[in-house]
Amino acid sequence: MTLELGKIAAQVTAMGASAAQRAEERAAIVPEILKLLREHAADAGLRAKVDAAIRAGWSGAVPTAEPLDAAFDPPALPERVTLVATDGSQIYPDRHSLALYYVINVGSIVLRLGTSETPITESSPIVCFDDEQLYGEEEYPVSGQVINARRAVAEMAQLARLAVEEAGPAPTVALSDANIALRVKQEGIPAAEGRQLEADYIAQLDRLHSARVPLAGFVSRPGGTSVVRLAQLATFAPDEVAERVKNSSRPFGGLGDTPVFAALLGPGQRSAVFELASKWGTPYKGAGHAIHFFYVNAGTPARAVIARVEVPEWVASDRQGLGLAHATVIDQCRVTDIAYPYVLTRADELAVITTAEKANFEQMIGVEMLRHGVGQVGPSEKAATKALARYGRKR
């Protein structure tokens, strides 16, 4: 049995109409948000409201020294600049497979702009199969959340190592895909391991900071509402902030930040820098890496494409490093026509494990198991039956 599209056509039609209606309603709110940002662009009292809101458990965008409605053009790139980027992928454990294991693969690229040198690319796979890697202190194999966190640490370690090695002759920028903090669902990670993973990850941020290499995380198609939440906070009276924060729901009908900055930013421009107030960001703030962000328009005059760029506080407070991060992101987004940094695209290509590669890897495992006299060298009966049902029997 397969998905019968005819049975869901009416539901899809209704979904499309609903999405169009929501988009129209939210677009009508954008001018109101922009008006609030302009009215409170340099509002000293707003910071006092933010502090009170954070004490009440609020999360959102914290103003910095830049006006809330700012729109900055990218500075010119230096004649020479080195970009380092990494990305990762994984194969999760599968008890129906030939053996119990998982794989983490990190792809990396070093691109020396302003030279004729060929990019340096690398793929670094790690196969984890012993009990300590698979179980730790748990009864069951490690969860997907644990593997995701271990992969993120491996990505950042590779990024820091390469970027620190490159730092010196030319300005160097380290680019990562998505957030720069280790953001995983902590309920799937044992507390002790979670603390160790976070410490290992922050140690890599320390390396980049010590080498004065700007770090930027590129978040494509962001869904955040941090700045909209700040705009809502600006409407609260100072003496009712705590109570309003506790009782407020999704502000402005669930409007996200993206349409606001699509209306505010021209091609290549970035917004003001904001600090991100959140519970998960506390360890980073304590270690000197408080998460900051800005929005950029990586699109064209005909079509805005808004992305969020995350940087640690030591980049946010360094005008040269911040400008370098902004300029390199926009430059890389213009290499292709997809408004996504070229070096991150290449890192993803180097990291991804295809279905064919996984099948060949499984075949290698089977050969080795046979060579060592292991009795069962096939998938489980359940896996074999599913494969037969999905792909058919060859005749």
Image: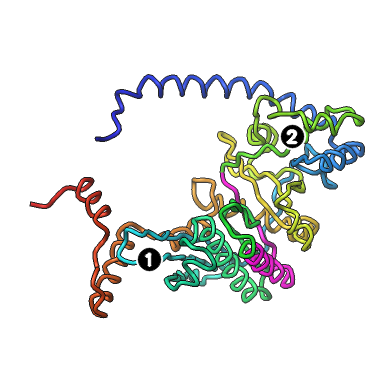
Q: Residues within 10 Å of mark 1 (few under 14, many from 20)?
A: some
Where in the figure is residue 254, as x and y percent of width and height?
65, 28
User: Is 227 situated above or below 282?
Assistant: above
Residue 50 vs residue 321: left or right? right
Give the colouring mode of the picture.
rainbow
- Report which quarter residue 91 is drawn in: bottom left
Where in the figure is residue 129, as x and y percent of width and height?
42, 71
Residue lying at 59% horizontally and 69% vertically, measured from the top left: 157
Where in the figure is residue 76, as x and y percent of width and height?
69, 56
- Report which quarter residue 177 is drawn in: bottom right
Where in the figure is residue 286, as x and y percent of width and height?
79, 60
User: Is 57 situated above or below 313?
Assistant: above
- Give the camera-side residue of 78 and 303: 303
Q: Are marks 1 and 2 in contact (CB under 8 Å)?
A: no
Residue 395 vs residue 110: left or right? left
Point out which mark residue 100 bears: 1
Residue 339 vs residue 235: left or right? left
Q: Which residues are magenta?
A: 195-220
User: Is 121 situated above or below 74?
Assistant: below
- Mark 1 and mark 2 lie on one chain; the one further toward the N terminus is 1
Residue lying at 86% horizontally and 32% vertically, measured from the top left: 241
Q: Does 202 lie within the magenta span?
A: yes
- Report which quarter residue 35 is drawn in: top right
What secondary structure is the stretch in magenta mostly built from? helix
Point out which mark residue 229 bears: 2
SS type, badge 1 = loop
Of all residues, the one furthest to the left in this rendering is 395
- Give the camera-side residue of 15 and 242: 242
Q: Residues within 10 Å of mark 2 (few under 14, many from 20)?
A: many
Residue lying at 33% horizontally and 67% vertically, measured from the top left: 99
Quadrant the N terminus occupies = top left
